[in-house]
Image (cartoon, helix red, strand yellow):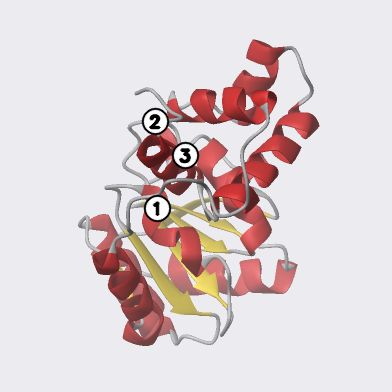
Amino acid sequence: MRLAIAAHAPALRAGLRILLGAAAGIEVVSEAASLAELPTSEEIDVLVLAAESTWRDDLEDWLSPGSSTAVLLLVGEESAALRWLAELGARAWGALPLESSGDELLAAVHALEQGLVAGSPRLLQPLFDSSLAGGPALDEPPGGALTEREAEVLQLLAQGLANKQIAVQLGISEHTVKFHVSAIYTKLGASSRTEAVRIGVRLGWVTL
């Protein structure tokens, strides 16, 4: 199993590398403070990510379309990252508290490699409840109408383009794209690209 670790704190990365790298069948091929410093997702079987909510776009950009890389998020007690974890699609994913034991980490990593969802029931149950609840039909977005540029960005999100690709397509900076994406999330009440596109479809603003 090829495993990568991403965490801001050097001590946390070192601890995870020692713990997970010592297990049979696991090779820690890379560790970094940011996702941009890691190999492409095609080279990784499982990513262990000590994530903050601000890493959402970085993770979506790093995960290649069609990639089967599993993602295990290590999160605090109240982490906004859990709101978009389930939006990663069909790939395996999981969530554990930062204070999880070594046995719990290893069990989750092996489960993810097998394509399963794994993690603490306390963290995952709210996600399953929210997913099962679905959502009502929308007549208008909760935060108001999108601007013409925001509508263009939303349509390109629906096509699976990353921020850099959208910037090139529209002739604007990547920073500006991130600003528009953030505004779209706020206006639509979305927590991820997938959710924003789904809401856009329900509103008739996105053509797939």
What kind of residue is marked 1? Glu
Position in image of residue 57 (x %, y %) = 60, 45
Q: Dividing the image into 4 quarters, which one contains the C terminus? A: top left
206 versus 52 height, above or below: above
Residue 63 is labelled as 3
**What SS does tag 1 mark?**
helix
Q: Is residue 31 visible?
A: no
**What SS does tag 2 mark?**
loop
Q: Nearer the viewer, mark 1 or mark 2?
A: 1
The quadrant holding residue 162 is top right
Identify residue for label 2. Answer: 65
> What residue sits 30% from the left and 64% below the top?
131
Q: Is residue 201 visible?
A: yes
48 versus 67 height, above or below: below
Q: In the current view of this chain or complex, which residue is farthest to the front?
A: 139
Seen from the viewer's position, the closer of residues 111 and 95 is 95
The quadrant holding residue 37 is top right
